[in-house]
Amino acid sequence: TVTFFIHGYGSSWHAEHQMAKYLVGHGTSNQIIRANVAQAGTVTLHGKIRAGARNPLVEVNYADNKTPDPTAAATRLHRVIQAVNRQADLKQINLVGHSMGNLSTLAYLDRYGETPALPPVKHLVILAGGLLPGREDEVVGHLRQRLPRGLKVLNLYSTGDQRIPNVRSRQLNPLFANRAATFQEVQVKGLSHSQIHESKQVDRILLQFLFK
């Protein structure tokens, strides 16, 4: 299973690297590659998934890291997944988004989650996520009607997050609770918005959810 990490607003692949390194260091993966997405949407892969690699990790890096448009977000992630799929013939994937990275993952699932030519999404991890106020149906209009079969979801947020209020993160719960194959809501204590992707506590929760 290949896991894609998608960073948030104004950020980069560096925000994903702590989590990826933790998974490699604890033996659940043995390879990290990077997918750079240029302003024009062109995808360049840095590294090639080796034959027989164990649960490879893809750190997605957006040059245009401030776009709030759901369709553009979905299209960019779709191009990344297509590029890696051409290289490695993916059987299934996991998606991990932090902050606005969840716009990419949710919009991708909404538009492409049941496309037969694409690998199915097994796990979705929402870190410090929340829907755009007033634009909810643009992001998850289809998901409100039908979730991809077998999808397992983790919604994790922190009491110390001053950027995305916990109430907005919890607004995602009805989308998945009692509808996903499994659904977990986890509230951690005291971590700031950015500390969530730099936390060993969160790393341990990710490892358990994705690979146990």
Image (cartoon, rainbow, N blue to C red):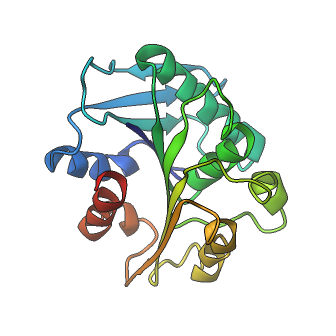
* Vertical relation: 105 (above or below) 197: above
Residue 6 appearing in the image: no
Residue located at (29% from left, 46% from top): 20
* Vertical relation: 133 (above or below) 105: below
Q: Is residue 91 left or right of residue 42?
A: left
The C terminus lies in which quarter of the figure?
bottom left
Viewer-side residue, 12 vs 94: 94
Q: Is residue 212 left or right of residue 193?
A: left
Query: Residue 160 at x, y = what percent?
Result: 44, 82
The N terminus lies in which quarter of the figure?
top left
Query: Residue 22 at x, y = what percent?
Result: 22, 52
Residue located at (64% from left, 65% from top): 179
Viewer-side residue, 164 vs 155: 155
- Residue 108 sits in quarter: top right
Residue located at (39% from left, 67% from top): 196
Q: Is residue 151 left or right of residue 196?
A: right
Residue located at (80% from left, 51% from top): 142
- Residue 135 sits in quarter: bottom right
Residue 90 appearing in the image: yes
Query: Residue 10 at x, y = what percent?
Result: 55, 50
